[in-house]
Image: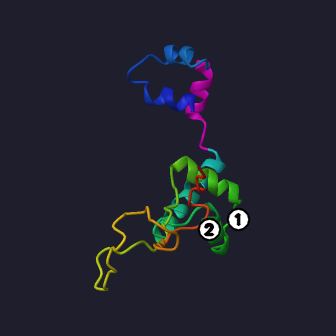
Amino acid sequence: MRYRVIQEHDRRYPIRLMCRALAVSAAGYYAWRIRPESARSVSDRTTLSVIRVIHGESRETYGSPRIWKALVTQGHRIGEHRVARLMRQDGIRAKTVTKWRATTQSQHRFPVAANILERAFTVEAPNRVWAGDITYGTPSQRSPPVWD
């Protein structure tokens, strides 16, 4: 990674200065420049192109487990963690689809009961006024009742 930074900025700054600043040897940098690309990085690059295709075909909804399964189905010999690493390094993430939730529909054609109570919650005697409420959501989404 440090060598790549040096290579990207070698036209702007002296190589030996950047090597000193990044605590690497100049000889190591020059050896890295002439070294051929490793088989692993070549394999990573070709696998990443296949991952991009699978991810695109899934409308970007597949994460690493499903992409790994698709690769294995296609005959690739690869580990799930390697797929996850390549996706993470390339910034490939699955889009999460939000589930449809039932909510109150305020614009409908059904009759609405008259508001007889008119928010007058204090009454003269018990059992004069009854009120109800519909709470949407699961118990975990609701806040606990407050007791005074």
Name the residue furthest front: 124
**Labelled pair 2, 1 in contact (Cβ < 8 Å):** no
Q: Position of residue 111 (x, y in %)?
A: 31, 85
Which disc, if any, is residue 66?
Answer: 2
Q: Position of residue 49 (x, y in %)?
A: 51, 60
**Is 11 on the left or on the right of 25, as rendered?**
left
Q: Position of residue 67 (x, y in %)?
A: 60, 66
Residues in magenta? 25-37
**Is 14 on the left or on the right of 107, as rendered?**
right
Secondary structure of the residue carrying numbered label 2: helix
**Neighbours of disc 1 within 10 Å: few (<14), some (14-19), many (20+):** few
Residue located at (42% from left, 63% from top): 121
Residue type at tag 2: Arg
Occupied quadrant, residue 140: bottom right
* Vertical placement of residue 92 versus 1, above or below: below
Q: Is residue 112 magenta?
A: no
Quarter of the figure with the N terminus: top right
Distance from label 2 to label 1 (Cα)? 15 Å
Work out whether mark 2 precedes mark 1 in sequence or the reverse, and give the earlier one: 2
Front residue of 78/110: it is: 110
Occupied quadrant, residue 73: bottom right
Q: Position of residue 57 (x, y in %)?
A: 47, 71
Front residue of 116/100: it is: 116
Query: Dot 1 corresponds to which residue?
Result: 77
Residue type at tag 1: Arg
- The rendered magenta stretch, by its main secondary structure, is classed as helix
Which disc, if any, is residue 111?
Answer: none
**Number of numbered tags placed on the structure image:** 2
Q: Is residue 33 magenta?
A: yes
Secondary structure of the residue carrying numbered label 1: loop
* Scheme by which the image is coloured: rainbow
Residue located at (52% from left, 61% from top): 94
